[in-house]
Each structure stands twice: as C-alpha cells, then as structure tokens.
Image (spheres, grey):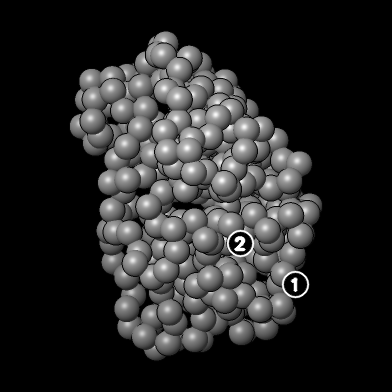
Amino acid sequence: MRQVTIAGSGGLSNLTLGEAPDAAAPGPGEIRVRIAASSLNYHDLRVAMTEGATAPGRIPLADGAGTVDAVGEGVTEFAAGDSVVSGFFPLWLSGDALPSSFATVPGDGVDGYARETVTMPATWFTHAPKGWSAAESATITTAGLTAWRALTVDGPLKAGETVLALGTGGVSIYALQIAKAMGARVIVTSSSDEKLERAKSLGADHVINYRETPEWGEAVLDATDGRGADHVIEVGGPGTLAQSIIGGKVGGHIALIGVLTGRSGDIPTGNLMRRQQRLQGLIVGAREHQQDFVRALDATGIRPVIGDTFDLADLKAAFLHQKAGAHFGKIAITI
C-alpha cells in the first residue's frame, strides 16, 4: 500500500511517499478499513512543519474515511462494505473525562491516515453519513465535529441567535452551515471579498472584510443593533480575541478553537469580565458527539464544502496551499 511518513526531524521537505504492507487482518474487536480520503487541518500542518515534534517515521493526518473490508471477532456495529469515518480522540468515547493531550490522536501521538489500509479497534470509527463520498466524510473528524461541539454541545445554540464565524476555513464554514440549518443568523469575516461572496451564497446574513474594517467588533455590534453575537467561532487566538469580545453579546459564548495568530498574547480580561462572557477552549469532541453529528447531517442534508483536492502523492503541495490560506472550506486528500 502507499503511505506517507514524516522522515527525520520533521518539516514539509521530509514528507516521504513510500510503500508498506497492507494492514493485518483484524483481531477481536477490530476492523480493517481501506482508507479512500483524508482532509487537512491546521493541526496536521503544525505536526508536519514542526521539527522534532513527533516520532521519526510518523504517518500524518488525523482524518480518515473509507470502507470496512474485514471485521474481527465480536464486532457487531460494523460489517464489510460499511462506509466509516475516523474519530479524533479515539479513546474519548463519551462523558466529561476530557482529553488534555494529543498522545492518542492519529497523525500526532500515534500513526494517522495518510495510508491506504489500517486495522484499528472498531471504536476508533463511526458510520459515515448516508450517501457521502469518502472525501466528504473525511471532513467530519476534526473540522466538522469541532463546529458541531462548539455550537450544539458547548453553546448551546438556539434558533434566532447570531453566530459570528471568523474566516472561511473548514471549521468556520461548517459552523455557518450548522447554524443556518438550526435557524440562526450568521456573520462571517474574511480578508477576501471573493470568499465573503461565497459565504453569502451559503447563507451568511452579513459579511465583514476585516482588512477594510480593522475594528470589526464594532461592525458586528452595528449589524446586530448593538446586541452582539451570541456565539463566536474564534479561530484566531490572541490577534483576534479582543475584537471577538467587543463583537460578542454581553453574557455571550466565545468558543476558542484555534490559535492562528499565535499561541500566547495579551487578552483584555477586563473587557471580558465587564461583558460577562464565557470564553471556552475546546478541541474537537467525543465519539458520542460524532455519532450525534452524523445523525444531524443525515437529517438536515448539509454537505461539506471542499474547495480543493490533492492526491496523497501531492501532500506537500496540499500543505503549502493550506499554509498560504488560499483555500475556502476544506482541502481533501484522495488516498
């Protein structure tokens, strides 16, 4: 089978395409999956780019979707031929025992899905939405589930509320789609007028070019008659958080999902306190959340937005495209 590994001390130049034996037959409680697609997340990019961040020879990519081709003894949830999608935290099945490290995350602490076959415990996967391609299903694991948890588990979002989504990457576009399906109003920010027009075509009620409007928090207040956004999908971190606090409703919810502007920085804690907002960090979700999300996708008819597709052999080019911020929605990898 084909697979990509991160050679040496890491870095995009050390992504190596090679051959390896197919995954072994499944043992008790396991399934073997033929992986057909993955999708890129900034977590994957950071792992691939950071020298010395992971074990030499690590197989990257946290997302994996494909078809079950064999099941081990005792497996009743899946059968050969089922379409499945991987989970981000494979040991977090449900409940409040939240993981606090990436030690068991595929593509980081353990080998990921940049390969054609895997044999894993059955609980590392869920069923995929009905009728979805593998590339579509692969967008669920990280980006889709993060948006779902932020809005429906941690929110919780109610019809008629306003969601502010920063940017037009995978999480923010999923948040736009979920929020509109649940009867919410959505505001989207971007530095690209072209991307903002695409967001409007997906249902965004109001868009803001943050380069043209640096004080975009005030613009959010203007767009909501001074009320502010009930929920903020905050992917920027320290460079955007001050404006998110301004644009958020008094008593609102800010879901801290990403740190694209840096891992640390000044936080206007006084304004956060004055506005009595809830700033909550989150990393993806549990298997139970993913199962709920898949049922919601089947019920609503939401389909993911895939802006670009690359073959596994072109994984480095895909990462460079992602790093440049040229994409809209998700970047798919065919395997």
Q: Helix, strand, or loop for circle 1?
A: loop
Q: Quadrant of residue 16?
A: top left
State left or right for residue 137 relative to residue 259: right
According to the picture, the residue beneath numbered tag 2 turns out to be 292
According to the picture, the residue beneath numbered tag 1 turns out to be 183
Q: Helix, strand, or loop for circle 2?
A: helix
State left or right for residue 81 relative to residue 26: right
Q: Nearer the viewer, residue 95 or 202?
A: 95
Q: Nearer the viewer, residue 286 or 203?
A: 286
Q: Amino acid at mark 2?
A: Asp
For image coordinates 42% across by 68% down, the residue present is 95
Q: Residue 171: where, in percent of width, then height? A: 55, 53
State left or right for residue 262 relative to residue 135: left
For image coordinates 45% across by 25% down, the residue present is 25
Is there a contact, CB below 8 Å, between mark 1 and mark 2? no
Mark 1 / mark 2, whichever is N-terminal = 1
Tell me the distance, in whole angstroms, between the alpha carbons under discs 1 and 2. Answer: 18 Å
- Answer few, some or many: residues within 10 Å of disc 2's Cα (few below 14, many 20 plus, some between 14 and 19): few
For image coordinates 47% across by 67% down, the residue present is 255
Q: Residue 238: where, in percent of width, then height? A: 36, 61
User: Would residue 198 be visible to someone looking at this image?
Assistant: yes
For image coordinates 28% across by 46% down, the residue present is 103
